Amino acid sequence: DVKVTQSSRYLVKRTGEKVFLECVQDMDHENMFWYRQDPGLGLRLIYFSYDVKMKEKGDIPEGYSVSREKKERFSLILESASTNQTSMYLCASRGETAANEKLFFGSGTQLSVL
Amino acid sequence: AQTVTQSQPEMSVQEAETVTLSCTYDTSESDYYLFWYKQPPSRQMILVIRQEAYKQQNATENRFSVNFQKAAKSFSLKISDSQLGDAAMYFCAYRRYGGATNKLIFGTGTLLAVQP
């Protein structure tokens, strides 16, 4: 079965720190996604990537950047963490074998910025 | 722009009973996909069921079924014989047909409690 692994389950950082959230998938999927999940707002797409070194902005890219140097790894970077970036971050991947292919999610990283 | 609305922030059901979670969406597209995802306390999002808009027949997966009303842009999830393990946050989601870059748009979620 597909496995999407996020490096940290819980993370506490200070305002202004540079934060790296790592995500690795083991099924050779082309597409990878970063979402943030907030109560009452559901999941909102931050960035996604459909190939190595390719990236597209999602709905809320401000304050974030991403890196995809290898197919299996997709990193989310908070250049200078702020308290309003305290949230649950979910990584997901999807192949392209079918147009309705489902997303496979990691277990999430709960980030607290103090 | 496409939007997905879940108007029930929380629902509760007795074990073994049936519950229906509501979802409406807005789109001008004719071809698209709809999904229900479940997020239990473990936080691992799991696909429950999916529906292709071009199919008139409602999708069914064991105790889970949908009522897809394309004209009304409604996509409700029915859970029959509810079990304690069904307690979770449920998200409705929409994806436009075709294209690698078409993103999945989620609703705000419905938290389902199952009472023993």
Image: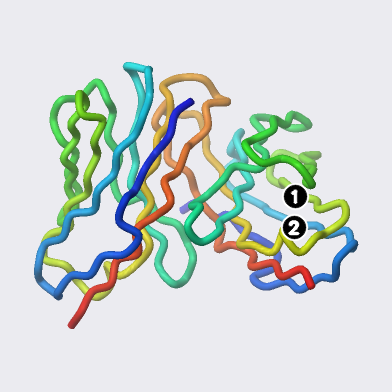
Q: Name the image colouring.
A: rainbow
Q: Which residue position is annotated with label 1?
A: A76
Comparing A12 with A54, the one in front is A12
Estimate the spatial distance between the alpha carbons at disc 1 and disc 2, rounded to whole Å.
5 Å
| Label annotation for residue A59 | none
Task: Output the chain of dot 1.
Answer: A
Please state which amino acid type lies under the numbered disc 1. Answer: Leu
**Residue at position x 25%, y 48% from top?**
B22
Residue B116 at x, y percent in the picture: 18, 83
Disc 2 target residue? A21
Helix, strand or loop status at disc 1: strand
Can you give x and y, in whole percent of width and height, for residue A20 in the image?
Answer: 80, 57
Q: Residue furthest bottom?
A: B116
Q: Please say if A46 is above or below B115.
A: above
Are discs 1 and 2 less than 8 Å apart at CB? yes
Left or right? Give the position of B17 relative to B79.
left
The x and y percentages for residue B12 are 22, 70
Residue B20, quarter of picture = bottom left
Q: How many labels does the image show?
A: 2
Q: Position of residue B55 (x, y in %)?
A: 20, 24
Chain label for disc 2: A
Instruction: Please tell me whether mark 2 sits on a helix, a strand or a loop.
Output: strand
